Amino acid sequence: MEKKPKLLWVAIGLVALLVIAVLFSVFQLTSLKSEVDSVRAENEQLQLTNDQLQLANEYEAINSQFAQYENQAVQMQGDTLLAKYTAAKNKVEQLLQELNSEKVKSQKRISELQNQISTLRGLLRHYIAQVDSLGRENAGLKAENEEIKNKNLQLSSQARELSRKNETLSERMTLAEKLNVTGVQLTPLKKNGKKEKNVTKAKQLMVTFTIPQNNSTPVGSKTIYLRITSPEGSLLGDAGTFPFEGGNVPCTAKKTIEYSGEEMPGVTLYWDVNTALTPGDYTVELFADNFRLVTRHFTLKK
């Protein structure tokens, strides 16, 4: 009789262990499923984020391609196609901004962005086709205008000859203007030729400049005339006069150079100080071939 209760307790213990084992297995399975679901959701978010980045890159590529044709967009301002493209472009940018602000991505929003970019791509293709067509039409009109122009030129030999003479006269008038000077500097010098900071002690004033290369300017002898005006408004020096705008103008110094068309750096003109100089603003002017080449103002200190 004593063995039956013992067996009963053993059976109860086994059943309890079995229940515990089942409950533990269920807990593990539930926990594992939750973990799997979490990993799956995280992977889905990563995939959606990657899709968003790819779509954003595609949008940038489309926008970059459109930018190549923006200079021609003015010709099509009234075209509804351009308005549609602009509207679709704004919608894409709005969706990208919204997606960037969302912590959790949705497939629906990504699909909406994909559809908008697809629409944008189609509009771009259509737009480019219209721009190219317009370019071909313009090229045809240009060729037609060129043909008409050639016929008019053939029938207007006298007008062409007069135009050629006017162009020649214009070129002659501008040749001297093309003798430019750059880097003009006014420097007070000591007796030994070194720079003097105090203008009241200067023994010489040196003007330096560069004549840039210019193949359109005739080569040969060029006389450069220098005028230096003191702060009081008086011309320094007396190196004679030179012709300018129908009159004779006095100058501070002059120098004759041989211009070969190549750059001439470090051209210098000197004036030996023979009067008291005062601190203030000095004006430097350079002339050649009846043209004023440059005017510069320099402040010399004591």
Image: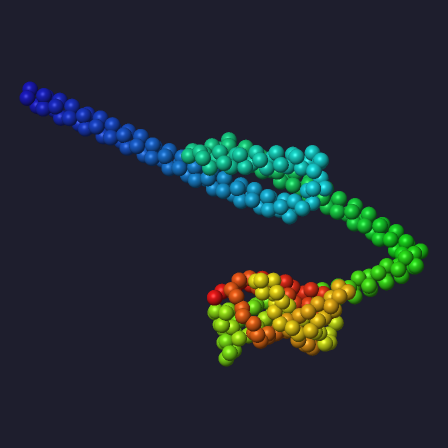
In the depicted view, which residue is nearer to us: 146 or 96? Answer: 146
Q: Residue furthest left?
A: 2
Residue 172: x and y in percent read 79, 66
Report the side of 234 relative to 149 (left or right).
Answer: left
Tally of marks: 0
Report the side of 142 relative to 222 (left or right).
Answer: right
**Can residue 82 be seen in the rendering of this structure?**
yes
Q: Quadrant of residue 33?
A: top left
Q: Residue furthest front?
A: 275
In the depicted view, which residue is nearer to us: 104 or 153? Answer: 153
Q: Does 248 sit above or below residue 77?
A: below
In the depicted view, which residue is nearer to us: 172 or 141? Answer: 172
In the depicted view, which residue is nearer to us: 150 or 9? Answer: 150
Q: Which residue shows up at 69% across the image and 45% down it?
A: 72
How was the colour assigned to the protein in this rendering? Answer: rainbow
Q: Which residue shows up at 81% across the image and 50% down it?
A: 142
Report the side of 217 relative to 20 (left or right).
Answer: right
Q: Residue furthest bottom?
A: 192
Q: Does 40 sit above or below residue 202?
A: above
Q: Does 68 sit above or below residue 32?
A: below
Q: Residue furthest top?
A: 1
**Can residue 296 be seen in the rendering of this structure?**
no
Q: Which residue shows up at 74% across the image and 72% down it?
A: 218
Report the side of 108 relative to 156 (left or right).
Answer: left
Residue 228: x and y in percent read 61, 67
Residue 70: x and y in percent read 65, 44
Q: Which residue shows up at 53% across the image and 62% down it?
A: 280
Residue 283: x and y in percent read 60, 63
Q: Does 112 sit above or below residue 237?
A: above
Quadrant location of the N terminus in the rendered image? top left
